[in-house]
Structure formats: structure tokens, C-alpha cells
């Protein structure tokens, strides 16, 4: 008679953190698989950048400041559409597809309501504490996670 087999002793893998999805990101034109996590307004960023943004968002909210993301991670199709609009003169400045830091999941555009708004002042004073830097001088709304 064969030996009796008991219940499995192998533990199932831990579930992925809530809201994590995977997508193709691009860094300097090279595709790579990245973990994406949610940030407010239905946007996503690379998971480490999203965690930092969510901490920054909570700190701003505690100070009475609303940080509303308007753009986070972008797919290749989204970046291609923005690039075409930019090249045709119908859109804002946009990086070449595959070379946008939005496609790497580290860039976020935040509705700052102008250069002198409470949001802009708060970000300029505190964003670096959370690893964010404004990297495009002409765009007060564009912030990148660069810890």
C-alpha cells in the first residue's frame, strides 16, 4: 500500500499589495516590467514612487493643501499621442516616446494652480523631504521621484 499523503505544508505566496499592477515602463528607451501602485485621482506611479507620493499627499492634506495629480504613469500609446500633439503644435511640451519619465513611473504632474499658489509654495518647501524634485524649470506642475 502506498504511503498516505497528508495536507500540503507549503504556504501560499503572499498576495501582492492592494492595487499593485504590472506594466511596461521605459527608461532611456529601454522597456522594463515595473510594478505600479495607485495614487489619488485614479493615477498610478512606480510602486516606490507611489508610496512616497501618497505620504507626501497625506502630509500636504494635514497642512490644508490639496495635491491633485493630473498625470502619472503613461503607456507607450499615451506618450505617442502626446508626442504627436506636441510635434504638430497642438499640445504641450512632451518627451519622445520611450524617453519620458512618466513612462518610467517616476513623474507626476500635479494641479498647482499657478506658480504662486499654496500648492506650489508647499511643494517647493516640502517635496524634497519625500524624494520629489521639480525637474522641468518651465513646468511648476511636473515633479519627479528622485530620492
Image (tube, rainbow, N blue to C red):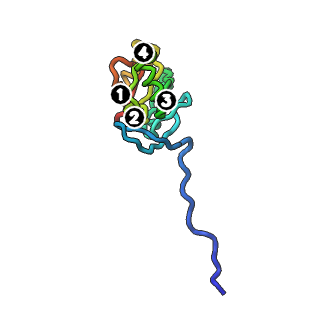
Residues under labels 3 and 2: Cα distance? Answer: 11 Å
Circle 1: element type: strand
Give the residue at mark 4: 89
Residue pointed to by mark 1: 133
Q: Quadrant of residue 112?
A: top left
Q: Which residue shows up at 58% across the image and 68% down it? A: 9
Mark 2 and mark 3 in contact (Cβ < 8 Å)? no
User: Of callouts 2 and 4, which one flags the residue occurring earlier in the amino acid sequence?
Assistant: 4
Q: Which residue is mark 3?
A: 78
Looking at the rendered image, the disc whose residue lies closer to the viewer, 3 or 4, is 4
Q: Indicate the quadrant where residue 116 lies.
A: top left
Which of the 4 image quarters holds residue 52?
A: top left
Relative to 118, is 12 above or below?
below
Instruction: Residue 43: give x, y in percent of width and height.
Output: 52, 31
Residue 129: x, y in percent? 37, 31
Q: Residues within 10 Å of mark 4 (few under 14, many from 20)?
A: few
Q: Which mark is residue 98?
A: 2
CA distance for labels 4 and 1: 28 Å
**Looking at the image, which residue is at 35% across and 27% down?**
133
Q: Earlier in the sequence, mark 1 or mark 2?
A: 2
Query: Which is nearer the N-term, disc 3 or disc 4?
Result: 3
Decide which of tag 4 and tag 1 comes sooner along the chain: 4
Circle 2 crowding by C-alpha within 10 Å: few under 14, some 14–19, many from 20: many
Q: Name the residue located 56 percent from the left edge and 30 percent from the top edge.
A: 42
Q: Is 102 or 127 nearer to us in this picture?
A: 102
Q: Are marks 1 and 2 in contact (CB under 8 Å)?
A: no
Amino acid at each position: 500500500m502506498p504511503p498516505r499523503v497528508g495536507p500540503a505544508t507549503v504556504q501560499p505566496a503572499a498576495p501582492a499589495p492592494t492595487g499593485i499592477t504590472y506594466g511596461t515602463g521605459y527608461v532611456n528607451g529601454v522597456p522594463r516590467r515595473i510594478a505600479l501602485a495607485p495614487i489619488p485621482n485614479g493615477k498610478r506611479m512606480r510602486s516606490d514612487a507611489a508610496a512616497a507620493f501618497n505620504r507626501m499627499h497625506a502630509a500636504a492634506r494635514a497642512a490644508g493643501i490639496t495635491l491633485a495629480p493630473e498625470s502619472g504613469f503613461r503607456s507607450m500609446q499615451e506618450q505617442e499621442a502626446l508626442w504627436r500633439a506636441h510635434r504638430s503644435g497642438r499640445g504641450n511640451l512632451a518627451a519622445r516616446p520611450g524617453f519620458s519619465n512618466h513612462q518610467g513611473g517616476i513623474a507626476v504632474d500635479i494641479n498647482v494652480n499657478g506658480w504662486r499658489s499654496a500648492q506650489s509654495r508647499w511643494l517647493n518647501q516640502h517635496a524634497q523631504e519625500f524624494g520629489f524634485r521639480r525637474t522641468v524649470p518651465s513646468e511648476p506642475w511636473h515633479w519627479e521621484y528622485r530620492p
